Image (cartoon, rainbow, N blue to C red):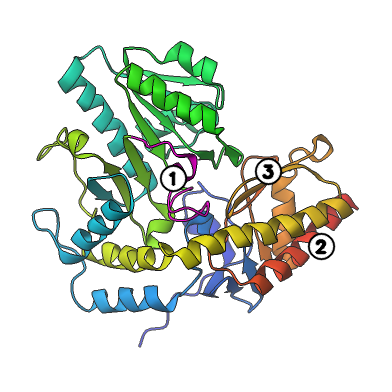
Amino acid sequence: MEQPIAVTRQSFDDWMIPVYAPADFILVRGEGSRVWDQQGKEYIDFAGGIAVNALGHAHPVVKAALVEQAGKLWHLGNGYTNEPVLRLAKMLIDATFADKVFFCNSGAEANEAALKLARKYALDNFGAEKNQIVAFNNAFHGRTLFTVSAGGQPKYSQDFAPLPGGITHTAYNDLAAAAEVINDRTCAVIVEPIQGEGGVLPADGEFLQGLRELCDRHNALLIFDEVQTGMGRTGDLYAYMQYGVVPDVLTTAKALGGGFPIGAMLTTDALAKTLGVGTHGTTYGGNPLATAVAGAVFSQINTPEVLSGVKQRHLWFIEELNKINQQYPIFAEIRGGGLLIGCVLKPDYAGKAKQITQYANEEGVIALIAGPNVVRFTPSLVIPEADVREGLARFARAVARICS
């Protein structure tokens, strides 16, 4: 048998288009909430593949579903349906407000589909002038040209002008500002219940309820981007349930596949009719391999034990992070919900989030940033208590180095 090509971290710089700046080690194996690099060094994983590995690494139930389906059928194309995709659709429908589902491969694709649905629904029902999309500053909705334009972070979009038009950005959590820009020409409002990439900033309940009322008043669709908050991340299956505000369209991805690429757009029967045969599509979306894996993930997460466990794990994190902050007063605020947690740095430590995560790597724990001033944690929803406490002990050593 031919030996695999030998690779090192330098191989990335030699062969890959440099859109990422990965850590200086290569991870090769994971089990539960721990991962190991090429040299055998162990890390506790508080990043979870950016809120993707909701059941940790190599979960036995998910692995079994992957292996079983891999021995049956991988891909067909959208001229044919398959059993796993239909079962997963029914699971999502039964557990949410939705009547219909569109499957794709990523959060960006799900948001792209949602925005296209909104534009076409408005065109079909109200005319061409009703085409404006309202989004929010510091939002993140993906990297396609449409979704990166809807995201409210010019650093990600400005180099790709001319950008798609008809998108207005306003302040997050400011209902009065939203009311000034939402009008009868608005076809959709897209919002994250917790801004993830934008700094782990939760929406106020009154803000989301106000958006619902504004959308109803102006016949606009309310789209909840739950790519990061969905699939149990906040302690409810989807964050809209926690807020008691039901959107017209919901997008989900990341943890839906537990590490296998899949995304979905959920909506009602009335709106689903907008996208008839040929109006939208995707080659790989809804393939039997992805949907079989996602079905196993969904069945594991959508249980009282896992969802209540997220809330318990939130308390473990907050308890230990508060202890760290008492010893090393570096955080101005610890915010978020469930296992989407952001630690906001005080002004004296502004811009040092990346350095903290680099020190954390050296101490044997993997964390994320959400902008230059926020350290973010999105671990497995089933991470053991021992891993939480040991990982935060390692993280405390990283913080101590910053403060010394």
Q: Which stretch appears magenta?
A: 229-247
The dot on residue 270 is: none
In the image shown, does 389 or 247 lie closer to the viewer?
Answer: 247
| Label located before the other in sequence (2 or 1) | 1
Asked if 43 appears above or below 376 in the picture, the reply is below
Q: Position of residue 92 (x, y in %)?
A: 30, 54
User: Does the magenta stretch mainly form a helix, a strand or a loop?
Assistant: loop
In the image shown, does 304 or 33 lie closer to the viewer?
Answer: 304
What's the distance in space between the residues labelled 2 and 3, CA to CA?
Answer: 18 Å
- Direction from residue 396 to residue 240 in the image, left or right: left
Q: Position of residue 66 (x, y in %)?
A: 32, 73
Q: How many neighbours does mark 1 have within 10 angstroms: few (below 14), some (14-19), or many (20 or more)?
A: few
> Is residue 99 in view from this perspective?
yes
- Direction from residue 384 to residue 140 in the image, left or right: left
Q: Position of residue 167 (x, y in %)?
A: 39, 20
- Direction from residue 301 to residue 360 in the image, left or right: right
Q: Which residue is mark 3?
A: 374
Q: How many neighbours does mark 2 have within 10 angstroms: few (below 14), some (14-19), or many (20 or more)?
A: some
| Label located before the other in sequence (1 or 3) | 1
- Which residue is found at the position 67% from the left and 58% from the top? 315
Q: Which residue is mark 1?
A: 241
Q: Secondary structure at mark 3?
A: strand
The dot on residue 397 is: 2
Residue 402 among magenta residues: no
| Label located before the other in sequence (2 or 3) | 3
